[in-house]
Structure formats: C-alpha cells, structure tokens
Image (tube, rainbow, N blue to C red):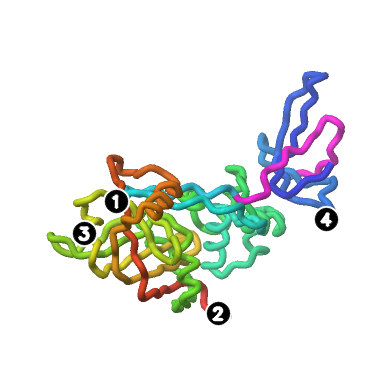
C-alpha cells in the first residue's frame, strides 16, 4: 500500500458488516508512501497514526492540475484553434492552496508557524499550497483560524468582486515586458478588449479572439460597434489578474484593423473557431489587427 498526502484512507469490512470510516492522510512516515499514516478522521476530526489492516484501502486523489475552465464574458464572436497536447509539467497549486500561501506570505508567516497553529504537519501544509487539493472543512477551519481569516475567504468567497479589491503584495514590483513575452501572453487566447472610435464616441468592447500569424482576429457582425474598427488604428488589450496572489499582467497591442475577406483565410478562421458566438446571432465578419506596437507590464513580488 502506498499513498500521497491528501489521499483518503477508507476502512470498511463488507463481509462483517462493520461501519465504514474514512479520513484524510495528513502525514507520511516514509518517503515511498508506505504505512503508517497520520490520518485526520472525518467523523471526529482527530489525527491518529494508523497501520492499515486488510480491511483498509487508499482512495487516491488526482495529483495533477485540473483543466482550466473557459472565461465567461458577454462577448462577440469566439475563436481559437485547438493546439496540440501540452507538454508534461508539474501540477499547479489549486485555488485554495494559492490563497493560503498568499495570505501566509502577506502576513510574513512561515509554514512551520501556520502549521503549528493549525495542528498539522508542515509537510501537509506544503502539499496544500503546492498541489491541487480538496482539504476537508475541518482543515480549512483550522487554517482560517491560524491565518485570522475565514473559510469563505479561503474558498474564494469574494471571487465575484471586481478584480483588484484583494490584498496587494507587501513588496510589489512593476516591470515592463519584452516583445517575446508579450507575444507569448497574447497567444494564450481568451477574452480581450478592443478600444476604438465609434460614431457615438470612444468605446472599449470585449471580444473573444485568436492569434494567427502574429495577427489578432475576432468575429463580429457587419454594422456592429466592433466592426467600426475596420480601416482605423485601434488598441487591443488582454490581461490576467491572480486575485489570490496579488499578481497580474497586461499586454497592449496597437495597429490597423482590416476586414478579412480572402476565402481561404475566412475558412481557416471559421474552421478553427472553438465555440459559437456567445452573444448569438449571425457574426460571420472577421476582423484582423496587425500590431505595430506591442507593450506589456507585470506586477509581481519584488526580486530578492
């Protein structure tokens, strides 16, 4: 039997009709994951050392990052051809782990200090902060108490608030991004904002987009506000805010917009679109922006 931190130990004996008991493995005594384990039982919330018998088995959690859900926004068309498989990489921390780590670091606390306050092993706290995990309510309650916050906050209770209302970093650093980094961030696709002049005045509008051959393309309808971009110089902005970590970046592209009319190019864009227009209706007009200026900024922790 082998286990990882965060796995579930289940004890049940169907043959004898014994009661089922389960708990979260919060401590390992051997690097290879073999017993014994420190288990926090779900029925008592107590931690005990367990040498599993024949009536026990380990329920393994997924030790890999979950796929990102698409952004939600009331936007025009949407496009973005699917890329190839992503290269293997270490799992990213889950949202709860990032919030725990961000709050701990904001207060200048060590893992050992927070783990001691929360009555858990520092190794388990490291696991929660660094790996995708779904800690029990009891674990979250102790972490919230150790950090002087609430379970709701650790679960992202304020996630629907306008971005930027979270805690700022203690020592933030604002740095300019190079052209290559800007292109890499821009090519992640998603929702961007186009700034243009309309007959009613300046406007900033959200659109789903894709990047094809260094050009930004989005789908709209003839006569719509985004269609007014054609034939003029516009600005296009895309950004990302990690509210739990107090970090974020933005990229700004400026250049002329044109109506894509070549049949092969239109077919390529239509075939590569990853979803139908969220706003509904016919939106078969493709607009492309060729950036002539590309700049970006990132806010993160100051260099040590």
Tell me whether the residue at label 3 lies in contact with that at label 1, contact meaning CB atoms closer than 8 angstroms.
no
Q: Quadrant of residue 18?
A: top right
Q: Residue at x 25, y 49 (%)?
A: 221
Q: Residue at x 41, y 68 (%)?
A: 250
Tag 4's secondary structure?
A: loop
The numbered mark, 1 or 4, whose residue comes first in the sequence reads 4
Tag 2's secondary structure?
A: loop
Find disc 4 in the rendering and name its residue.
Answer: 31
The numbered mark, 3 or 4, whose residue comes first in the sequence reads 4
Tell me whether the residue at label 1 lies in contact with that at label 4, contact meaning CB atoms closer than 8 angstroms.
no
Q: Which of the two marks, 3 or 1, is nearer to us in this view?
A: 1
| Viewer-proximal residue among 73 and 104 | 73
The numbered mark, 1 or 2, whose residue comes first in the sequence reads 1
The numbered mark, 2 or 4, whose residue comes first in the sequence reads 4
Instruction: Tell me how far mark 2 sits from mark 4, CA to CA.
Output: 33 Å
Tell me whether the residue at label 2 lies in contact with that at label 3, contact meaning CB atoms closer than 8 angstroms.
no
Q: Position of residue 120 (x, y in %)?
A: 69, 53
Q: What are the residue bounds of the magenta stretch? A: 48-65
Instruction: Tell me how far mark 3 sits from mark 1, CA to CA.
Output: 12 Å
Find disc 3 in the rendering and name its residue.
Answer: 228
Above or below residue 300? Residue 147 is above
On screen, residue 25 versus residue 177, left or right, reads right
| Viewer-proximal residue among 256 and 123 | 256
Q: Is residue 113 magenta?
A: no
Find disc 2 in the rendering and name its residue.
Answer: 303
Q: Position of residue 207 (x, y in %)?
A: 33, 54
On screen, residue 273 versus residue 22, left or right, reads left
The numbered dot on residue 285 is 1
Instruction: Tell me how far mark 3 sits from mark 4, CA to CA.
Output: 62 Å
């Amino acid at each position: 039997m082998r286990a990882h931190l965060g796995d579930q130990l289940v004890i049940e004996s169907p043959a004898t009709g014994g009661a089922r008991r389960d708990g979260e493995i919060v401590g390992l005594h051997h690097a290879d994951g073999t017993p014994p384990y420190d288990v926090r039982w779900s029925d008592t919330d107590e931690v005990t050392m367990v040498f599993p018998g024949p009536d026990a088995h380990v329920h393994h959690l997924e030790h890999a990052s979950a796929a990102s859900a698409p952004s939600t926004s009331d936007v025009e068309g949407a496009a973005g051809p699917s890329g190839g498989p992503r290269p293997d990489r270490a799992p990213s921390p889950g949202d709860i782990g990032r919030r725990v780590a961000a709050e701990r670091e904001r207060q200048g606390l060590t893992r050992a200090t927070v783990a001691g306050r929360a009555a858990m092993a520092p190794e388990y706290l490291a696991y929660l902060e660094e790996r995708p995990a779904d800690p029990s309510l009891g674990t979250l309650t102790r972490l919230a108490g150790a950090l002087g916050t609430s379970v709701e906050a650790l679960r992202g209770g304020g996630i629907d608030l306008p971005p930027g209302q979270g805690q700022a970093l203690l020592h933030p650093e604002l740095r300019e991004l190079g052209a290559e980094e800007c292109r890499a961030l821009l090519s992640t696709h998603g929702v961007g904002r186009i700034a243009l002049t309309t007959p009613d005045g300046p406007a900033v509008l959200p659109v789903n987009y894709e990047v094809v051959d260094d050009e930004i393309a989005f789908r709209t309808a003839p006569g719509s506000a985004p269609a007014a971009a054609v034939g003029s110089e516009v600005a296009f902005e895309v950004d990302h805010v990690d509210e739990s970590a107090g970090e974020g970046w933005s990229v700004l592209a400026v250049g002329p917009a044109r109506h894509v009319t070549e049949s092969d190019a239109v077919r390529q864009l239509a075939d590569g679109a990853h979803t139908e227009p969220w706003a509904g209706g016919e939106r078969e007009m493709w607009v492309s922006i060729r950036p002539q200026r590309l700049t970006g900024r990132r806010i993160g922790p100051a260099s040590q």
